[in-house]
Amino acid sequence: MRFRSLTETEFRNFAKTSPYKSFAETPEIAKHRESSGWTAYYLGVEEDGKLLAATLLIAKPTFLGKSTFIAPGGPLLDLENKPLTDFFLKNLKKFAKTHNGYVLRIDPYYEVVERKRNGEVAENGFNHKIAEENLKNLGFKPAPGSGQPKYSFVLDIKNRTKDQIFAEMKRNTRNHIRKAEKMGVKVRELKREELKIFKQITESTSLRRHFSDKPLSYYEQMYDLFTPRGEVKFMLAEATGVAECATCSAGHEDLARAARSVPEGHAVHSVTPIPLSAAMFMLYGDEVIYLFSGSDEKYMKDYNAQYLIQWHMIKFAADQGFKRYNFYGINGLPDPSSKDYGIYDFKKGFTSEETGRVTELIGAHEAPLSPFFHLHKLLQKLHP
């Protein structure tokens, strides 16, 4: 086996074939990181002229002339293959250390155990716990701050039609979707110049739910990097209907009441559609990933736009031949007593026992490369 540098094209072609590929481990993310001071490397293992493993590695100076090295969403290899894992990771550590690295952090898109819809371990399912042992033996320890959620919830859409998927959803979820359609909610893709609408919705949601939102520049850059490859979509659900004639003057605050007052069979319309919910989706490999979203709290219960935007993209994923729809992060294994249980329950509603499941990734791991490792960690905490 031979450890060597790769071209961007070599890395991209290998990633296409890897079952461990992730949008976080792409040249587009490398360019995104480079814009904020990181340096990108593409590295791999070759044998008899064939690539066996590869990774994007990014580096940035921190303190005392040393650098942090990270494989975001990588490396791309089977971590249960001990000879290959040993060879590749030992060489990655050597490479990082030679380039003044004080730590090598990896964050593979690698499931460790198969789980079912409610989070329980699947009987006779896969178990890749040996991968954790292989990492431990190489000096890697679990690390906080993974760029990917430890637990996610996914919908299996492989070989299923849209009608089958809809029929298998929970009844309440189907009712919410139908209600949104009846209320005149429409879903469309945002253009770049409209991303400020997306940002307004996500920012208000982040303030309400106490999480940190990305700046508008992040969304614009992700749009610029991934749109040419058809790998990102920013979707907006908006109310296109208010009651005609006498009730048209009801105003935006009474939008839902006005729409409900329209007699059966009468059309509804709106001169200015009202943004209700927005979401960002990555389209990479075999899956569509629901990455970020927000909703206008005033209209959530009346319009259920957050349900329709998901259904719109699930239908898109099925039409385009994707194998799964990834609802992305949930806060730990499902626990009805958790304050965030509603997020999991919302996502679960789009699935059945056969189509929905919780995924568990191996998580971020890091290996110290310097005797001053702990000093660097302390400095990073004091000066993030």
Image (cartoon, rainbow, N blue to C red):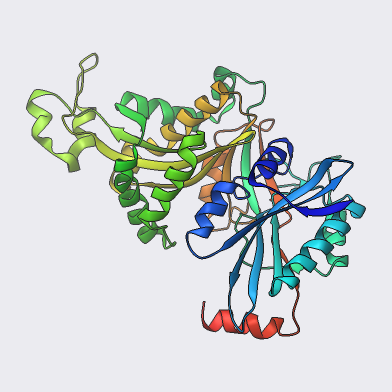
Q: Residue at point 70% right, 72% down?
A: 103
Q: How many marks?
A: 0
Pick the front one: 263 or 148: 148
Which quadrant would residue 115 be assigned to in this image?
Answer: top right
| 144 on left or right of 17 | left
Taking 64 as reference, is 242 above or below it? above
Q: Residue at point 22% right, 29% down?
A: 259
| 313 on left or right of 86 | left
The residue at the far right in this view is 83
Q: Residue at point 59% right, 56% down?
A: 331
Spot occupied by residue 341 in the image (x, y as percentages of width and height): 55, 52
Pick the front one: 17 or 213: 17
Spot occupied by residue 7 in the image (x, y as percentages of width and height): 67, 47
Taking 275 as reference, is 365 above or below it? below
Taking 321 as reference, is 133 above or below it? below
| 234 on left or right of 274 | right
Pick the front one: 46 or 261: 46
Spot occupied by residue 150 in the image (x, y as percentages of width and height): 65, 55
The residue at the far top in this view is 265
Is residue 194 visible in the rendered image? The answer is yes
Q: Residue at point 49% right, 41% down?
A: 226
Spot occupied by residue 307 in the image (x, y as percentages of width and height): 44, 35
